Amino acid sequence: MKNIFFISTFLLLTSFQGERRMSIAKFVTSQFDQYELEESYMSDNFVKSIEKQNLHLYSDRILLKAKESHKNKNSYDKPIFTRIQLWQFYFESKEKCNQAFDSLLKCFPNDCAEIEKGKNQSIKVTPSIWVFCDSEIYVARTSCEHVDEKWEAFKKDFAFTFAEENSKIIVTECGKLKWTTKEEIKNAP
């Protein structure tokens, strides 16, 4: 019952967004075959370089939990339920969105490392995908022990849903950062 209330509330709030594209609240409804809403605490430290600039008009955040457990080497072969944090930031202009993007380049999570635009690199970071549009930034993140085939499929859905043809996209894996495009993600095996 709480999940129905959460989704109803998210959909109601996001229905008044005018010309904005799909919200993360609407997106997660397409993921309910694999995930459910999680109501536990969700840290914003991962997106603090964007949050602290306070350039956005509105933001949204959602936490998902996989319905089925999995095991991998990072979970020491113990059953674990994948959890994915999602954020969406709306900006009143392309300029403000670019300012937030620039602040992220100067302080990329987890260790506030400086990164170069367009340069793939090794970096201490957890798995995530960042989609930068003209006036919105979309982020999804999990932890290394939560990565499984569902996460790989989720990233493709996330990029396909939110990225425009000219969007900048960053995909991170455990210790790696890669700049990519919607087309590259679409054609990945």
Image (cartoon, rainbow, N blue to C red):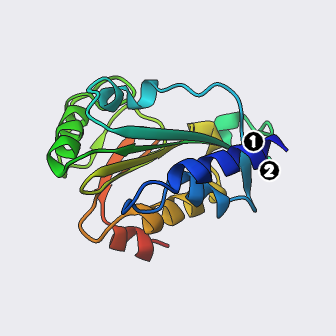
Determine whether the residue tagged by mark 2 lies in a helix, strand or loop: loop
Q: Are marks 2 and 1 in contact (CB under 8 Å)?
A: yes
| Quarter of the rendering containing residue 88 | top left
Q: Position of residue 93 (x, y in %)?
A: 20, 48
- Name the outermost residue toward the right: 1
Q: Residue at x 29, y 57 (%)?
A: 133
Q: Position of residue 110 (x, y in %)?
A: 39, 27
Mark 1 = which residue? 81
Rendered image: mark on residue 159: none
| Disc nearest the viewer among 2 and 1 | 2
Determine whether the residue tagged by mark 1 lies in a helix, strand or loop: loop
Q: Is residue 93 left or right of residue 54?
A: left
Badge 1 local density, few (<14 within 10 Å), some, or many (20+)?
some
Q: Quadrant where the N terminus lies?
A: top right
| Quarter of the rendering containing residue 182 | bottom left
Mark 2 = which residue? 67
Residue type, mark 2 in image: Lys
Give 148 or 97, whichever is nearer the viewer: 97
Q: Is residue 140 above or below residue 179?
A: above
Q: Is residue 17 left or right of residue 10?
A: left
- Name the outermost residue toward the bottom: 187
Q: Is residue 69 above or below residue 52?
A: below
Give 151 or 35, whichever is nearer the viewer: 35
Q: Is residue 25 left or right of residue 70?
A: left
Q: Position of residue 57 (x, y in %)?
A: 33, 38
Residue type, mark 1 in image: Phe
C-alpha gap between disc 2 and disc 1: 7 Å
Q: Position of residue 4 (x, y in %)?
A: 77, 49
